[in-house]
Image: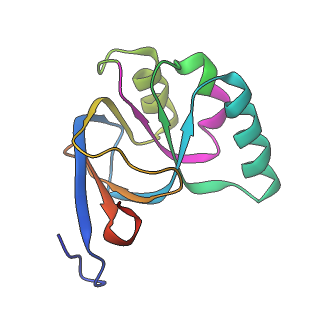
Amino acid sequence: MTDPSGHDWRLLGSGMATAFGAPKEGRLYEITGAQEALALLHRLTAEGGGDEAIILVHEAGGTTVGPLFEEIGAVLSTAGTLGAHIALLAKEYGCPCIVGLKFDHQPAEASWLRITPDGSVWAAEADTP
């Protein structure tokens, strides 16, 4: 897919979306536990916020990433449903969220992603292996 700005995008996977307005773009940060979540929180607050940060979690739930919701642009989870704690928190904070995400192509850490209201996750071609 090529967008009007000339970026080429590769579809990585899809899931169930909630709390969306328009498509969202940002840099991917994978969170595997509470220590990483806190480290990212400190980094984003020190840098003045992370509206362009998209976090990816696998087993981590809403409690682990809850403090990040005011600092990030979106959250992706390979687990859960629209009724999962992480999806409900995302909706409460107005943070775009995709749960039950299945990847056809795993994104690399720090990839530039676009997520869309239909639950699709895209990577900028320059950031895909």
60 left or right of 25 in image: right
Report the front residue among 84 and 103: 103
- Name the image quarter holding the N terminus: bottom left
Q: Residue furthest front?
A: 129
Left or right, residue 54 beside residue 121: right
Is 70 on the left or on the right of 92, as rendered?
right
List x then y, in percent, for residue 41.
73, 40
Range shown magenta: 66-79
Q: Residue at x 33, y 15 (%)?
A: 83
Between residues 45 and 27, which one lies in front from this camera angle?
A: 27
Q: Residue 70: x percent and y percent? A: 63, 41
- Place residue 9 in its image quadrant: bottom left
Examine the image and state in which quarter residue 38 appears.
Answer: top right
Q: Is residue 3 above or below residue 21?
A: below
Is residue 76 in the magenta section?
yes
Q: Residue at x 48, y 18 (%)?
A: 59
Where in the figure is residue 107, as x and y percent of width and height? 39, 49
Q: Quadrant of the C terminus?
A: bottom left
Residue 106: image location, x then y, percent? 34, 44
How many circles with numbers are drawn on the protein?
Answer: 0
77 inside magenta stretch: yes
Q: How is the image coloured?
A: rainbow
